[in-house]
Amino acid sequence: MQSVQRHTYIKPRTDTFDLVITAILAALVFVATMFINIRLPFGQGGLIHLGTSMLFISAILFGPKKGALAGAIGMGLFDLVGGWLIWAPTTIISRALQGFIVGKIAWSNGYRGDNMGLNILGAVVSMPVMMAVYYIGQAIMFKSWIAPLASMPGDLIQNVVGLLIAIPVCIVLKKTPYFKKNF
């Protein structure tokens, strides 16, 4: 009697695949930051850019690790090549934390970015953390605890705009066959 072996096909998640996805997400964050931005006329010369929405999208769709790396690499690279070199360390730290927080909350309790309430909560919880890191970074750079306050409105606007764009995009993307079968 021959035994019949049953094989269940499981799509392997390789390190190479994860590296490629992370690189693509970081590139998307970079492009959204570099080419879709408005320089603010107040504060420390900050920007409103769509990189924040891409960070939120990355973290919600792919989790905390990829969200952290996409935000830190994409926006950190923008600072390095976009003339904001002094900001790079602060950006890397703040955006890594922000991407991780969004992804960690969006992927909590067995959800994988499928619960819009958790996705919104993750983004909202990440905002004061991002803003606090930038505040501390600016306070160190400018040797003042007062001057960084001028950047807070711009940081808040950037985060809210990012959230308002990211949530509808995530809702649409979660309905695509790729996310339905792979996640």
Image (cartoon, helix red, strand yellow):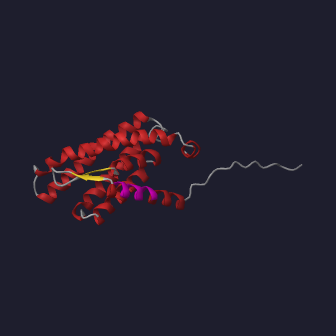
Residue 102 colored in magenta in the image: no
Q: Residue at left 45%, top 35%?
A: 115
Magenta region: 24-32
Q: Residue at left 43%, top 53%?
A: 66
Q: Nearer the viewer, residue 77 or 130?
A: 77
Left or right: 29, with 40 as reference point:
right
Residue 30 colored in magenta in the image: yes
Quarter of the image with the C terminus in it = top right
Q: Residue at left 40%, top 44%?
A: 104
Above or below for 105 versus 68: above
Q: Position of residue 126 (x, y in %)?
A: 31, 44
Q: Position of residue 112 (x, y in %)?
A: 48, 42
Left or right: 146, with 48 as reference point:
left
Q: Residue at left 53%, top 62%?
A: 16
Q: Residue furthest right?
A: 1
Q: Position of residue 145 (x, y in %)?
A: 11, 51
User: Is residue 119 visible to the viewer in this orientation of the structure?
Assistant: yes
Q: Position of residue 142 (x, y in %)?
A: 12, 58
Magenta segment main secondary structure = helix
Tally of marks = 0
User: Is residue 107 visible to the viewer in this orientation of the structure?
Assistant: no
